[in-house]
Image (spheres, helix red, strand yellow):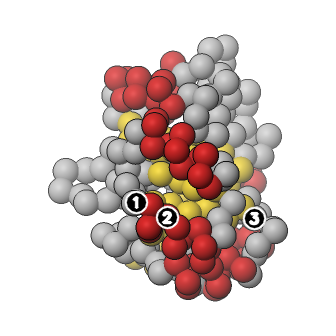
Amino acid sequence: MKPDIKICGLTTAEAVDRAVERGASHVGFIFFGKSPRNIEPDIAGKLADRVRGRAKIVAVTVDADNDDLDEIIALLKPDILQFHGKESPERMLTVKAVTGLPIMKAFSIREPDDLKRVEPYIGIADRFLFDAKPPVGSDLPGGNGVTFDWRLLRTLDASVDYMLSGGLNKDNIADALRETGARGIDVSSGVESAPGVKDLHKMDEFFAAVEGASIREPASGSAA
């Protein structure tokens, strides 16, 4: 079972090309001013055009308003909208109705109660993304290079489709996949030489590690 692979926070043509050449199913562009991976919508649109039709284009936002979303959608023409802020279920329903685009809703996880926040979004979000809660002092909701206890995901109903994120890299991805059985994975800082700087060699190593991972079927009651 090969998972979907999303390389997120892309900002250069070289990184976009390499991600898709190695088998990325999704490429993510971040529209959040505080992020070192922030990119302007027009530039992201040109990068996305290089691989459009070969990978899903994902627009990642944090509590974006309607005007910002309109600009991003017009210039990027994404396949999926990913929301990494405090967007309510009602907000997600409205965005889906207006844009007609599928939605991925991200949640930061540290303890069991964090997963309870997912329930109101089931049936609204087309997919979820589970990331680690940011360390103290970080202004970034994701891309912090930290993991969480993947065993927490065992409590999820098997019907909940998600991408696993948070501190994934070539050294831990096999364990992460064996533990969770995740059908999708998301990596950003794990393939960087510095915040926001994608490293093509690290990207190659990550894809090789995924390809070499022995992925077991999750135990009964685990997420699939």
Q: Residue at x 18, y 56 (%)?
A: 137
Q: Hey, which residue is sitting farthest left in the picture?
A: 137
Amino acid residing under circle 3: Ala
Disc with the residue nearer the chain's start (1 vs 3): 3
Residue 158: mark: none
Q: From the viewer's perspective, is 15 left or right of 89?
A: right
Query: Which residue is the site of mark 2?
Result: 69
- Helix, strand or loop under label 3: loop
Q: Are the residues flagged by discs 2 and 1 in contact, CB closer than 8 Å? A: yes
Disc with the residue nearer the chain's start (2 vs 1): 1
Q: Are the residues flagged by discs 2 and 3 in contact, CB closer than 8 Å? A: no
Q: Quadrant of the C terminus?
A: top right
Residue 64: mark: 1
Q: From the viewer's perspective, is 224 left or right of 165?
A: right
Q: Is residue 151 visible?
A: no
Amino acid residing under circle 2: Leu
Q: Residues within 10 Å of mark 2 (few under 14, many from 20)?
A: some
Residue 104: x %, y % from top left? 57, 46
Q: CA distance from mark 1 to mark 3?
A: 24 Å
Q: Nearer the viewer, mark 1 or mark 3?
A: 1
Residue 193: x %, y % from top left? 45, 76
- Helix, strand or loop under label 1: loop
Amino acid residing under circle 1: Ala
Q: From the viewer's perspective, is 72 left or right of 177?
A: left
- Helix, strand or loop under label 2: helix
Q: Residues within 10 Å of mark 3 (few under 14, many from 20)?
A: many
Q: CA distance from mark 2 to mark 1?
A: 6 Å
Q: Residue at x 38, y 50 (%)?
A: 85
Disc with the residue nearer the chain's start (2 vs 3): 3
Residue 55: mark: 3
